Image (tube, grey):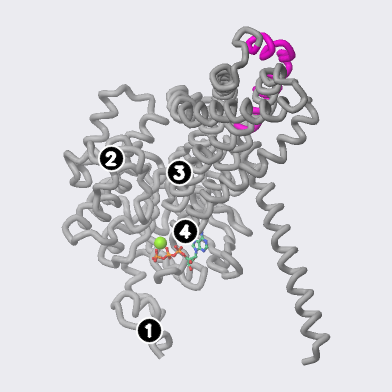
């Protein structure tokens, strides 16, 4: 065995693992779009399960409110602190309010709320569907002439997509309030001018682009969670893997698509 | 008793309820089914036997379209289940009831809700009728009064019986049972057999049952099929099956170890 040979087999090994990784990625993307396509297909077919939609909307919307609200409020507070420290240096303290409201509504509230929901809801979707997969409950649904995509995935994806914009709207409000409270209480900003500056440069487009982003992120993270769960294999360990990668993949895809969405919606 | 006519006599006349044609399936390179051919007459009770890991569960899941084969077809009432529109597939599946080897109960629901599930989805019954039917099914499998229990409170045998009750609740045309009486005590196991026998009396029910229990196989079968090495190696009426010369089948019937496998 010459050194050259071992080198060649080493290179082949690396190529092989690169190949397998990228095949895995393609498979992942394929599954995502399979679930997305099937979800759209079955959303507009009867029967419509209003009760289940309601249950899922409560689970996503109401139950996530505390964590999303808290995240956003503290983000608004930190944002006010940080920009104040910076803007102070060139005597632009007056613009703190505008920076806080613009960056929250356009970027931070949608992205942070979606990341929190990816952790809270995306993971539980993957765990729930994954457990149903490995215990044959999804097969049992098929066997009872019930389409699992329609029965399980449609209300979950639908509820997440529908509930994220209102969640983000509330997050916007709480974040702006956090910034206001810090500026007025700690930095001695004038409450009236701060309030005016908050809305002076804020367009409807800023808010609506943030809400559109939120809906898209909700769709992405719930489809990711459902597809991870739906294609789970390998028992309890497989469910664990699906749950983790639902959060990781969901978060990464949210951040990547955020860039492109911002470019499109600006 | 209609058993006699179902055997060979009616075969040529009526088209089969279920036809399996040249079915191939492998998992991770391992061939589990290698050209399975099988026909089940309407109103027949077919029992499939075979060694553990022979692919019986895989075969029965093909019958209802839970697994897509690599090659071959599953024809239900003349319609190809391996090649149909999603909505059409669902409609074909409405003819089926299936009980799974491990129960596959919905763990987010109670026992009652599990059995009521197919009724609520497909039967257009009012609530009182549903309650009555669920209670009737629970009584059939000797589980009266457990309707309010969570599925996690049940023993393995109870889960299997609830799965069985759920499969029959809608009184479908075709029933698939994957080892309905494994792990049950002899008396409860006989209860399951009795329920299956009673359903066989209704001429419009077609049944495919997997079992390891040869005693129960002889009790409930119109025909018995042996699945081995990925193919149906024998299929015959119980009395004929019993006297087949195949050494594997003889060992299977008597429960003796096979020399080649011991060695
Ligand atoms: N989803 C799957 N993925 C990979 N392999 C599978 C899958 N389902 C079944 N197999 C394999 O197929 C073979 C047959 O399995 P099957 O469950 O059909 O056996 P069986 O005849 O029902 O056995 P038993 O009597 O023990 O229930 C086994 O070797 C099993 O490992
Ligand atoms: Mg099995």
Numbered tag placed on residue B196 in the rendering: none
In the figure, B49 relative to B176: above or below? below
Q: Position of residue A187 (x, y in %)?
A: 60, 21
Report, in whole angstroms, how far the alpha carbon at label 4 lies from the one at label 3.
14 Å
| Label 3 SS | helix
* Chain where mark 4 sits: A
Q: Is residue A101 magenta?
A: no
Would you call the spot at circle 4 few (<14 residues within 10 Å), some (14-19), or many (20 or more)? few
The answer for how far apart the CA atoms under marks 3 and 1 are is 43 Å
Q: Residue at x 57, y 16 (%)?
A: A184
Identify which residue is drawn at 68% across, 47% down.
A30
Disc assigned to residue B258:
1
Secondary structure of the residue carrying numbered label 2: helix
The answer to if A216 sits in the magenta stretch is: yes
Q: CA distance from mark 2 to mark 3?
A: 19 Å
Q: Is residue A234 left or right of residue A7?
A: left
The Cα–Cα distance between marks 2 and 4, rounded to whole angstroms, is 27 Å
Quadrant position of residue A12:
bottom right
- Residue designated by label 2: B111
Range of residues picked out in magenta: A194-218
Nearer the viewer's eye, disc 1 or disc 4?
4
Give the chain of mark 3: A
Q: Are marks 1 and 2 on the same chain?
A: yes
Q: Dot 3 corresponds to which residue?
A: A128
Determine the secondary structure under disc 1. Answer: loop
Foreground mark, 2 or 3, reads 3
Chain for numbered disc 1: B
From the top left corner, tell me how far across and down residue A240 is, in percent. Answer: 48, 54
> In this rendering, is residue A177 above or below A215?
above
* Residue tagged 4: A237
- Asked if badges 2 and 3 are on one and the same chain, I answer no
């Amino acid at each position: 065995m010459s050194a050259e040979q071992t080198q060649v087999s080493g290179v082949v090994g690396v190529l092989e693992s690169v190949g397998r990784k990228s095949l895995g990625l393609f498979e992942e993307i394929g599954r995502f779009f399979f679930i997305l396509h099937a979800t759209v297909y079955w959303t507009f077919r009867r029967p419509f399960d209003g009760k289940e939609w309601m249950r899922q909307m409560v689970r996503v919307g109401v139950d996530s409110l505390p964590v999303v609200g808290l995240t956003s409020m503290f983000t608004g507070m930190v944002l006010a602190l940080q920009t104040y420290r910076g803007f102070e240096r060139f005597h632009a303290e007056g613009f703190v309010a505008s920076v806080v409201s613009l960056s929250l509504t356009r970027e931070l509230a949608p992205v942070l709320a979606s990341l929190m929901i990816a952790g809270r809801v995306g993971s539980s979707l993957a765990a729930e569907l994954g457990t149903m997969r490995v215990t044959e409950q999804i097969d049992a649904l098929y066997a009872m002439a019930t389409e699992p995509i329609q029965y399980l995935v449609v209300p979950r994806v639908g509820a997440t997509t529908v509930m994220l914009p209102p969640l983000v709207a509330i997050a916007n409000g709480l974040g702006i309030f956090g910034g206001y409270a810090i500026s007025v209480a700690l930095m001695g900003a004038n409450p009236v001018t701060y309030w005016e500056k908050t809305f002076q440069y804020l367009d409807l487009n800023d808010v609506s682009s943030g809400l559109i982003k939120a809906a898209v992120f909700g769709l992405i993270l719930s489809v990711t969670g459902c597809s991870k769960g739906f294609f789970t294999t390998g028992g309890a360990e497989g469910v664990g893997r699906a749950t983790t990668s639902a959060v990781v993949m969901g978060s990464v895809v949210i951040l990547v698509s955020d860039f492109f969405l911002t470019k499109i919606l600006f | 008793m209609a058993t006699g006519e179902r055997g060979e006599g009616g075969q040529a006349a009526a088209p089969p309820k279920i036809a399996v044609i040249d079915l191939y399936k492998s998992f991770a390179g391992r061939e589990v089914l290698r050209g399975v051919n099988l026909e089940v007459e309407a109103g027949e009770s077919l029992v499939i036997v075979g060694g553990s890991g022979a692919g019986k569960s895989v075969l029965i899941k093909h019958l209802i379209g839970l697994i897509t084969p690599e090659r071959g077809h599953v024809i239900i009432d003349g319609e190809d289940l391996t090649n149909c529109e999603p909505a059409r597939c669902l409609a074909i599946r409405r003819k089926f009831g299936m009980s799974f080897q491990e129960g596959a109960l919905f763990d987010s629901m109670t026992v009652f809700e599990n059995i009521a599930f197919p009724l609520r989805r497909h039967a257009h019954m009012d609530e009182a009728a549903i309650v009555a039917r669920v209670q009737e099914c629970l009584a059939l499998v000797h589980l009266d009064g457990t309707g309010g229990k969570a599925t996690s409170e049940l023993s393995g045998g109870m889960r299997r019986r609830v799965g069985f009750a759920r499969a029959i609740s809608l009184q479908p045309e075709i029933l698939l049972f994957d080892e309905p009486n494994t792990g049950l005590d002899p008396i409860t196991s006989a209860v399951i057999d009795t329920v299956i026998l009673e359903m066989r009396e209704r001429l419009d029910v077609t049944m495919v049952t997997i079992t390891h229990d040869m005693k129960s196989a002889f009790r409930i079968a119109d025909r018995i099929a042996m699945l081995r090495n990925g193919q149906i190696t024998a299929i015959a009426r119980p009395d004929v099956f019993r006297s087949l010369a195949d050494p594997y089948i003889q060992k299977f019937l008597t429960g003796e170890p096979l020399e080649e496998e011991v060695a």
